[in-house]
Image: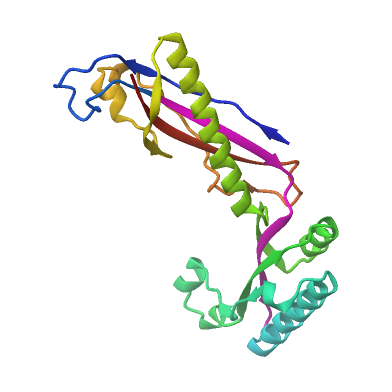
Amino acid sequence: MIFRHFKFFLFTLISINAEAGTLPAYPFIHVNGSATITLPANIAEMDFELTSFESSADETLTLLNTQSGEVLEFLSACQIVAADIEAHDTRKLVSSNEMQANDQRLQRHRLIRTFHIYVKNLEQWNAMTQYLFSRPYLGNFSVRFGRSDYAQIERQLTSRAAENARERAKELAGGFFVKLVGPTAVSEQALSRIDSELGLDGARIAQTNASANDKPTMSDLSLPGALMYKKTVNVIFRTK
């Protein structure tokens, strides 16, 4: 489902003084156009840690290897291929309190292993997360959702945002009975100098626009209802 909307502030200059600084030395219209695409997630990434802490170093390492084997076997059963699993090397974890302890034995037997998983099929997502979350030795979960067709979404957003900007420029030009010649500057960043040049700094509009490059995140493990990608373009059109 695709929603198109826009937030814009517009300036029409029929004539410009030569002292306008960095402003174009010709009449122009400045608009911004936006496009938003809302789609369900179809890929995800997951990070988590395995932790083992036993009375001896050998027991700790053996337990961690057993836990790792269980997790890898489960992921394989969920059709997660080896190429989509990053299992990092085992490392020793020492807390700040343990570092200050005189008893060196406290620093020897706590081991941790970090995993990063790419999930390209979300059909078993709920069963997968329920299993992993129920493991007492798993923790520090982090989940990110996305789309496998992100490059196509980016192109669609750019095209639709550009069209939205053109439509707004035509409306404004018609209202002031001027004719659009064509775009002379295009940017995905706000053209903040324009309000400064026109002496509108005190009435600056604060805008927070999430770009399509921002990947949506969630703190829990459930599938999001939808992901929203947004693109805003700023355009200067010359007029006559």
Residue 186 colored in magenta in the image? no
Q: Is residue 234 above or below residue 44?
A: above
Tell me the colour scheme of the image.
Answer: rainbow
Which residue does the image show at 54% across and 29% down from the upper left? 164
Total count of labels: 0
**Magenta part of the chain:** 30-55
Place of residue 66 in the rendered image (x, y in percent of width and height, measured from the top left): 76, 82
Residue 47 colored in magenta in the image? yes
Classify residue 192 as left or right of residue 23.
Answer: right
Helix, strand or loop for the magenta stretch, by majority: strand
Q: Is residue 228 above or below residue 170?
A: below
Which residue does the image show at 68% across and 39% down from the upper left? 38
Which residue does the image show at 45% across and 71% down from the upper left? 100
Q: Quadrant of the N terminus?
A: top right
Classify residue 5 as left or right of residue 63.
Answer: left
Judge by depth and name the residue closer to the eye, 76 or 182: 182
Place of residue 3 in the rendered image (x, y in percent of width and height, measured from the top left): 66, 31
Place of residue 170 in the rendered image (x, y in percent of width and height, measured from the top left): 48, 20
Residue at the farthest left position:
19
Image quadrant in which you'd find residue 76 = bottom right
Q: Is residue 232 above or below residue 95?
A: above
Q: Quadrant of the C terminus?
A: top left
